Every structure is written in structure tokens, then in C-alpha cells.
Amino acid sequence: MAPKLDKSLIGSEFDHTEFPPVTAEHIREYAAAALETNPRHLTANDAELVAPPTYVVSLRGRHFMPANLQTVLNIGRRGFDAGKDIECGVPVRVGDALTATSTVHDIYEKTGRSGSMVFVVLRTKITNQRGESVAVIDQKMMLR
Amino acid sequence: MTNPTAFEDVDVGDELPPIHLTLTPEQVKRYAEAANMPGGRFMSDELAKAEGLPGQIVPGNFSLALFSRLITDWSPRAKVMRLSATFRGLVHPEQPLTASGVVTEKHSSDQGEFIECDLVIESDAGDRLVTGTATVRLPPQE
């Protein structure tokens, strides 16, 4: 019988990163690279410029996942991005000082045609300098 | 109604105007750099193959960004409240893609007026490479 999946990491925080203030240049470059067409993200003046909803994915913390995740779950290093969910809060504007805190939100197992797969949901909460929620991002990783 | 400006303009079953595009390898690399995703798999065929992939791939985040654009091209006044995507297959540059969507639900509460959409990115062979949903807020007529 397969060993029971160790879910002890659920709830653990593995990254907390404070980012330098958001620049107009980065909002415009992200929006252009993402093929956005809305002038609010591209050509508005700095005071009116807002980042597209998916801009928050560019905020990469120091740790992508807990360092001991694969050891605890007893799984290999092969994994891929299975899905993502972004709950959008207040828009990101030029000069915002954003903070991201990441935790393990869920761990579960699914058995498919090609065997057993472990899914890990990593939740990143991003807030601005006023403590307002900018985004909650759930990243679902499939590991085997 | 092609470009709704108010909640009343939208009906369940309305289709979002599709986006047809073929991403170039340079566009994929530029997105990955702007999104701080330095993985070789997003940079070139050569680096992707070194990671065991068949070739350069499009980051899932880029697909999410295309979903976001699909919404705002449809209704520039719409505010995206939630975006979800399931990555079902690899998306490659130089592959003809169609992003499309349909309105599945409308609902109002004391929080405002909301529209639910189903979204998909398909290959020209009809493979559903990325599926998703969006919750969009569109204010009522003034």
C-alpha cells in the first residue's frame, strides 16, 4: 500500500518578499510584452497608468516553493504548472510598494491513467503599502 | 453587442470577439523577461530541448494575459475580478492560436454587477490547450 501523503506543510509560509516601488517603465513593458491594447496600461500618463491584472505574476519572491517540499512529499523533481487563479484586488499603480507572502495552501493526490500525481497549491497574497489586497494568486503545481 | 459598456448590454450566451494570433519566439522571450520568468524553456528551442521539452514553450502566465486582453478588448470598461486557467497542453510559438470566450452567467449583489465567462485557447487543430474562467465587473447604465 502506498504511503499516506504527508500534508504537514499545508499552511506553512515559505516566502515573504518586499519589492522595490513599481515603475512606469515596468508596467508599460509588461503590458506591451503581454500584447495588451488598452491605453490605461500603455500610454496613460504616470498618474493614470494602471498595471494589467496579470502584472502581479511578474513579482517573483526569493523562493518559488518550500525548499523541503519534495523531500517531505517523497516525490521527484519533475513538475509543471497545472493552473493558476488570480483574484484581483485594487489595481497596481506607479510607485506602489508591494509585498508578497507565499504559503502552501493545499496538497492532494489524484490518480489518473498515467499513475498517481501530487498537486500542490501555492498561495501568494500581494498587498500594497496601504495594506490593501492587490491580488491573491493560487498556483497549482503537478508533481510526480 | 460587440463592445458592451454596461451590465445591461450583456446577455448570457454572448460571445467575446476571438483573438487569432501566432506568437513569435521573440514575443514569447520578451514576455518571459518582462514577467521575470527566466527559465530556459521560455527563451529558445535549444534551451527548452535541454530541459527535455520538444521546443520553446509559452508561459502559462502569457495565456492568462491573453484571457485578460480578451475581456478588455471586448469591453474596455470591464474590470477583471478573477481569472482562472487550467493548462492542459503545451503552447508553442509559431503555432496558430485562437482565444475565445462566452458569457455563462450574470449576477448582481450588494457588491455590484458581475459577469461570468468561460474562456479557451485552442490550436488550429481544435485542441483545447488552455481553458479558463473569468469574473468581470461591469457597472450598470448611469
Image (tube, grey):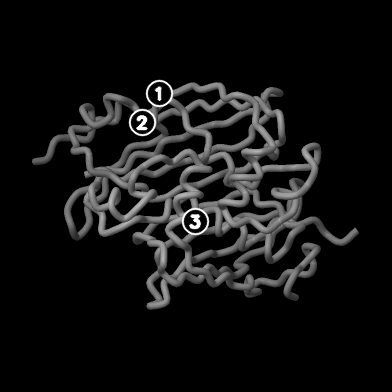
* B54 up-or-down from B51: above or below: below
Calculate the distance from the C-alpha at mark 1 to the C-alpha at mark 3: 32 Å
> Image quadrant for the N terminus of chain A?
top left
Q: Which mark is residue A65?
A: 2
Question: Percent position (x, y) of residue A52?
Answer: 64, 47
- Tell me the residue that label 3 is attached to: B27
* B4 up-or-down from A115: above or below: below
Calculate the distance from the C-alpha at mark 1 to the C-alpha at mark 2: 7 Å
Which chain is home to disc 1?
A
Q: Which of the two residues, B117 or A53, is positioned nearer the viewer here?
A: A53
Q: Are marks 2 and 3 in contact (CB under 8 Å)?
A: no
User: Could you tell me the amino acid type at mark 2?
Assistant: Met
Is residue A144 found left or right of A16 in the rendered image?
left
Q: Are marks 1 and 2 in contact (CB under 8 Å)?
A: yes
User: Could you tell me the amino acid type at mark 1?
Assistant: Phe
Disc 2 secondary structure class: loop
Mark 2, Cα crowd under 10 Å, few <14 / some 14-19 / many 20+, is: some
- Tell me the residue that label 1 is attached to: A14
Q: Which mark is residue A100?
A: none
| Same chain shared by disc 2 and disc 3 | no
Which chain is home to disc 3?
B
Q: Residue at x 73, y 69 (%)?
A: B10
Is residue A20 found left or right of B78 in the rendered image?
left
Question: Percent position (x, y) of residue A62?
Answer: 43, 25
Which chain is home to disc 2?
A
